[in-house]
Amino acid sequence: MLQGLYNNCHLCPRSCGANRNAGEKGFCGMTDRFVAARAALHMWEEPCISGRNGSGTVFFSGCTLGCVYCQNRNIALGLAGKEIPKERLVEIFFELADQGANNINLVTADHFIPGVAEAIKEAKKEGFSLPFLLNTGSYIHADTLKLLDGLVDIYLPDLKYIDPKTAGSFSHAPDYPEIAKAAIDEMVRQLRSRCGGQRIETVFNGQGIMQRGIIIRHLLLPGRVLEAKLIVKYLFEKYGDEVYLSLMNQYTPPADPAERIPKLARKVTEAEYRSLIGYAAELGVKNGFMQEGETADESFIPEFDGEGV
């Protein structure tokens, strides 16, 4: 049983050793029981993920990181969410499908991967056919991701930092770059394996909705254009057009000035974002997504009010 992996938990690089099966909470703030804050159609992912119908998104509570600029603080800290059994999670998958979801989008499920793997297997046994998508900050052991081999069709990972100093300052995780690179390598390996082992063959349906593939996200932070360019360069040189890149400008500082980090107290400027997009184009990136307009003034964060859970 995969449930045993919650004993002396080392699923993420924090390696806190909590016995989550016995009710102890790990660094993530969670025991072995699923806690979800929302399960509903989500319209604000990349166009090939949300489409017109929406992505069937399950937002899990807890987090293995600890970003000082967290945009989902209430659920990351476990301040919102409802405990549910595996059977209920499987029901939620089918309910979202009945609502017309394009896929099942598992957001910040990293610390629940053993249980998630079992839930996906159970759903597939019951005839579930929509693609499963893991939406992750990428601070996760590659070996943990192997539990999802053959179960996840689409990976939507972040590559937040390439500089350990930045990762340490902003997410208390100086090892983030090496961990995230290894995690993304494992995601790519899995999808290549499903395509014969040589190259990911990204698949879209007739409506342009992704059925298999990987989209690597980077949220541009104010004053971090050089690091963002290094991230784009690393990803393009390593994977070329085998993966899609999503470069985002939606960073929004906390509304309360007292909660703002000096280096991150402002939005990204148009010039900063234009510089990053221009650099990606100069490199030759073609498979990518960019955001237009004043996205930092929009709300991509839904109410975590327990809807659908």
Image (cartoon, rainbow, N blue to C red):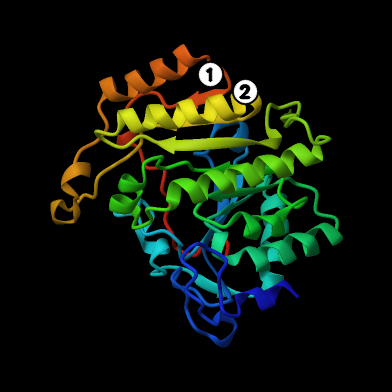
- Name the residue at 35% across, 49% down: 167
Q: Amino acid at mark 2?
A: Asp
Q: Would you place residue 19 above or below residue 240 in this image?
A: below
What number of labels is visible?
Answer: 2
Picture quarter containing residue 154? Answer: top right
- Name the residue at 71% across, 72% down: 2
Q: Secondary structure at mark 1?
A: loop
Question: Mark 1 sits on what residue?
Answer: 285
Return the residue nearer the eye: 82 or 291. 291
Q: Are marks 2 and 1 in contact (CB under 8 Å)?
A: yes
Percent position (x, y) of residue 86? 68, 71
Q: Residue furthest bottom?
A: 22
Q: Would you place residue 182 above or below residue 38 in this image?
A: above
Q: Is residue 277 left or right of residue 105?
A: left
Percent position (x, y) of residue 246? 50, 31
Return the residue nearer the eye: 190 or 238. 238
Figure quadrant of the N terminus? bottom right
Q: Amino acid at mark 1?
A: Val
- 2 or 1: tag closer to the N-terminus: 2
**Residue 225 in view in this figure:** yes
Q: Secondary structure at mark 2?
A: helix
Percent position (x, y) of residue 50? 59, 37
Return the residue nearer the eye: 200 or 61. 200
- As drawn, the label of residue 241 is 2
- Name the residue at 20% across, 38% down: 266
Picture quarter containing residue 115? Answer: bottom right
Percent position (x, y) of residue 300? 41, 43
The answer for how far apart the CA atoms under marks 2 and 1 are is 7 Å
Label 1 Cα crowd, 10 Å radius (few <14 / some 14-19 / many 20+): many
- Name the residue at 28% across, 24% down: 272
Q: Would you place residue 1 above or below residue 277 in this image?
A: below
